[in-house]
């Protein structure tokens, strides 16, 4: 799709909750020179506040309730995939989407699937990142946007933002400080991918045509 002559990559956002990072992406995509256009928001939970936020912004908002599929994880993901394709999505951003995706879905969207994680990967993969950083006495914490691969939080990192860990921090105060940088970080990372500057190639990140990272 395009606006004002600029090709814009149709992008969907998957959420499970309030949709703070989704809202940041939607706001950024209002700019005619932003290389992604948000065409769909999907939640796996009917109570997710982010659905109403998306609708208020004029973005199609859909519910695909994982509970209706029982243990059939792939069945749930096929329903997700059908919605994504119906709306013409070419990129998918996970933004607080609390479901582990199967290899089937990851392979189907390989190189077009992004996630934001509240730590400076490879540190603190998985859950309870703020508690773990505090328990370790970390001086820096933050957020990472990465390409999604089959292994949890293992995909190549596109960009990171760091915040200081302050004396007296609790998991809640540290989480709030990280959240402040997550939106701008995701906006920048999606722009890199939607514009073609950052790509997943053979399991490695290529930025501006150059391979980034070990190996």
Image (cartoon, helix red, strand yellow):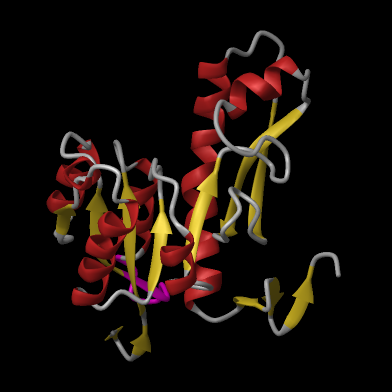
Residue in view at x 61 percent, y 53 percent: 151
Q: Looking at this view, name the residue that lies furthest to the front.
A: 71
Q: Quadrant of the C terminus?
A: bottom right
Residue 91: horizontal and vertical position, in percent? 40, 71
Residue 193: horizontal and vertical position, in percent? 53, 72
On screen, residue 136 versus residue 88, left or right, reads right
- Tell me, yes or no, whether the highlighted magenta stretch contains residue 32: yes
Camera-side residue: 205 or 6?
205
- The rendered magenta stretch, by its main secondary structure, is classed as loop
- Tell me, yes or no, whether the highlighted magenta stretch contains residue 95: no
Q: Is residue 197 above or below residue 79?
A: below
Residue in view at x 21 percent, y 36 percent: 49
Camera-side residue: 105 or 85?
105
On screen, residue 49 versus residue 200, left or right, reads left
Residue 17: horizontal and vertical position, in percent? 30, 37
**Residue range (magenta):** 30-37
Q: Is residue 26 above or below residue 138?
A: below
On screen, residue 116 versus residue 108, left or right, reads right
On screen, residue 29 versus residue 127, left or right, reads left
Q: Is residue 144 above or below residue 208?
A: above
């Amino acid at each position: 799709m395009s606006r004002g002559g600029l090709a814009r990559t149709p992008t969907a956002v998957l959420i499970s909750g309030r949709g703070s990072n989704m809202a940041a992406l939607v706001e950024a995509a209002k700019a005619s020179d932003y290389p992604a256009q948000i065409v769909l928001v999907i939640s796996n939970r009917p109570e997710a506040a982010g659905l109403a936020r998306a609708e208020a912004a004029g973005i199609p908002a859909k519910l695909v309730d994982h509970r209706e599929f029982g243990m059939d994880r792939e069945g749930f993901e096929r329903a997700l995939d059908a919605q994504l394709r119906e709306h013409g999505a070419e990129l998918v951003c996970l933004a607080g989407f609390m479901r582990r995706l199967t290899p089937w879905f990851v392979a189907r969207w390989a190189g077009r699937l992004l996630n934001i994680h509240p730590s400076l990967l490879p540190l603190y993969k998985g859950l309870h990142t703020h508690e773990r950083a505090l328990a370790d006495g970390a001086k820096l914490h933050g957020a990472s946007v990465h390409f999604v691969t089959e292994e949890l939080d293992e995909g190549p990192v596109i960009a990171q933002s760091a915040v200081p860990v302050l004396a007296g921090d609790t998991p809640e105060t540290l989480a709030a400080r990280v959240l402040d940088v997550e939106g701008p970080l995701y906006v920048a990372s999606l722009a890199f991918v939607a514009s073609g500057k950052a790509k997943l190639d053979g399991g490695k990140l290529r930025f501006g045509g150059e391979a980034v990272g070990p190996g």
